[in-house]
Image (cartoon, helix red, strand yellow):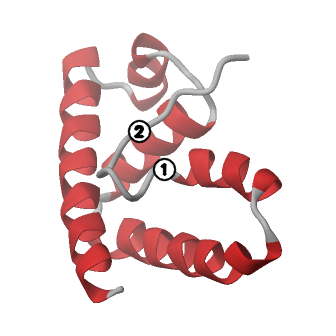
Amino acid sequence: MKQRLLYLSDAIETYAAMEQYCGQAHASNSHRIKQMKKLLSAAMKLELTEKQKICLMLYYLENQKVPDIAAQLHIRPTTVYKHLKKARLSLSKCAIYMNVLQ
């Protein structure tokens, strides 16, 4: 199954991409990777609505298609696209902030 990638900024990718990177990372990067995962997880909990989180996880981590997500959540596909767009925007703002802090 092909993995979808979500680019938050030039510096940070999605949790799924980080999981893939973790397998290839050197020991020297493991602390930074753990920190990035923790920050991304916190950003998802604090910055996203419940629907945005669900849509994001189903789309990127479980590779479900938008019509399938819409059927599961009993909403229209256009609403799923809106949730995904808003979630990406919120997380990209957090990614920029996290990049400034490091």
Dot 1: what SS?
loop
Q: Mark 1 points at which residue?
A: 14
Q: Is residue 38 above or below residue 76?
A: below
Q: Position of residue 56 (x, y in %)?
A: 42, 42
User: Is disc 2 in contact with disc 1, using a CB cutoff of under 8 Å?
Assistant: yes
Q: Is residue 29 left or right of residue 24?
A: left
Q: Mark 2 points at which residue?
A: 6
Tell me the quarter of the image containing the C terminus. bottom left
Instruction: Point out the tag, 2 or 1, that comes first from the N-terminus.
Output: 2
Looking at the image, which residue sits at the far bottom? Answer: 101
- The kind of residue tagged 1 is Thr
Residue at the spot 36% in from the left edge and 72% down from the top edge? 43
Distance between mark 2 and mark 1 Cα atoms: 5 Å
Tell me the quarter of the image containing the N terminus. top right
Q: How crowded is mark 2: few (under 14 residues within 10 Å), some or many (20 or more)?
A: some
Residue at the spot 18% in from the left edge and 50% down from the top edge? 89
Dot 2: what SS?
loop
Q: Is residue 55 left or right of residue 34?
A: left
Q: In which quarter of the image is residue 18?
A: bottom right
- The kind of residue tagged 2 is Leu
Residue at the spot 24% in from the left edge and 39% down from the top edge? 83
Q: How crowded is mark 1: few (under 14 residues within 10 Å), some or many (20 or more)?
A: many
Q: Where is residue 73 in the image (x, y as percent from the top left)?
A: 41, 31
Q: In this view, does 54 lie to the left or right of 1?
A: left
**Near-viewer residue (64 or 91):** 91
Q: Where is residue 26 in the image (x, y as percent from the top left)?
A: 79, 67
Q: Quadrant of residue 75?
A: top left
